Image (tube, grey):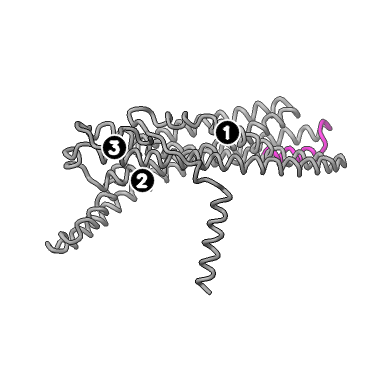
Amino acid sequence: MNFFTSVRLEQLASLLSRLYNFRNQVNLVNVDFNKPWWKILLQQKFVFAFTLVAEVIQGAYQALTPIIIGYAFINGRVEYVYGFFLGYVLLELLNRQNLKKYLLMTLEMSRSIKVSANTYFLTVDPIFHSTKSSGKIISKIDRASGNIQDAMNSLVGGIVPILSRFLTVVVAVSTLNWLLAVISISSFIIILSFQYFSLRLNLKIFHKEMISKRDRLSAVNIENLQQNSLIRSVFASNEQNKKMIEVARESSLAKANYYFTNGVITTLVRMIYITSVTLIMLVIYNLVEQGSIETNFAIAFIISYLSGSGQIMRLGQIIQNFSDKIAGINDLFKFIRTFGKQTYPVLEDDELIK
């Protein structure tokens, strides 16, 4: 039974692979580590722009959903329900095309960094390796190649949609009263400014230490695996294990300090946000009392605002994650620039991809 199940799964995997046809669409590029990392992104600028536009449209549509549905039911306009369904289907079809292009873009960037870095360390003169830790090199390559995908996910799947939804609801509520726009934009500027400067400061305080402790932990781990026989032969297992535990504790401490500070920042951001939401609800409540807007519409606008702006409280964490990933990428680029050089030919062709 397991055999036939395995065969069927392999056949299904083969069928889906042929259907998606990714094989002939994945390309690698040579990464120049002497240039900024975002130069790789510029090579995919059209795909990147298409992805951003698709995410902006999706975010705006989601933010307006409560208002569209509320308008349809309050005014008895069933055609708006059909229109909402059609719009959702069209956006989903657009998202599938967007996802395919986005996956290819991020995978190509990630694998290009990994292959180019390995090519560099393969060709650089051996003397420069003699005083460097293999574990540290592996840690930096793996971290940077994974970080490029995580950074793009944070930007495209987090920052852009959140900003799109928020700006959409700001425009929507501003049609009711100019004061709502002032409160929304003011709170957004305060929240964004506070998050940016506080998270940037937190990154400067703790990030260098985190990288150092992380690389040290990876180096000790590699050392234990590569020199297992030597460690056992000199009866140094206890000492090596104690070193591993101590390094792991130090690495955990550095990360705990960093993330807990982020937690404190998030709490302060939530206080600012809930204050702005309360003010907006009070203004809309006064509009209802004055007869300027019906209660049903007021509820729809409040729900829409909460739906579109609520993710702002996640924005700080996403920005922090994005900054952390970019710092990891820059760390590899900086490391390679100062690592060493190649003084004699090694490969047949200097180009990564012929």
Q: Earlier in the sequence, mark 2 or mark 1?
A: 1
Specify whether 19 is left or right of 194. Answer: right
Specify whether 99 is left or right of 262. Answer: right
* Nearer to us: label 3 or label 2: 3
Q: Position of residue 281 (x, y in %)?
A: 70, 37
Residue pointed to by mark 1: 52
Point out the image quarter for the C terminus: top left
Closer to us: 31 or 196: 31
Q: Is residue 321 visible?
A: no
Residue pictured at 56% horizontal, 28% vertical:
189
Question: Which region of the structure is painted magenta?
Answer: 291-305
SS for tag 1? helix
Give the amino acid at mark 1: Leu
Give the amino acid at mark 3: Tyr
SS for tag 2? helix
Give the amino acid at mark 2: Asp
Residue pointed to by mark 2: 142
Residue pictured at 36% horizontal, 45% vertical:
142
Specify whether 293 is left or right of 59. Answer: right
Q: Earlier in the sequence, mark 3 or mark 2?
A: 3
Residue pictured at 83% horizontal, 36% vertical:
294
- Mark 3 crowd level (few <14, some 14–19, many ≥20, 10 Å Cα): some
Q: Position of residue 126 (x, y in %)?
A: 18, 40
Residue pictured at 54% horizontal, 39% vertical:
102
Closer to us: 290 or 249: 249
* Nearer to us: label 3 or label 1: 3
Q: In the rendered structure, find residue 122 and report the number of the disc placed on it.
A: none
Residue pointed to by mark 3: 120
Q: Mark 3 and mark 1: span between their CA atoms?
A: 33 Å
Closer to us: 351 or 193: 351
Dot 3 and dot 2 residues touching (CB under 8 Å): no
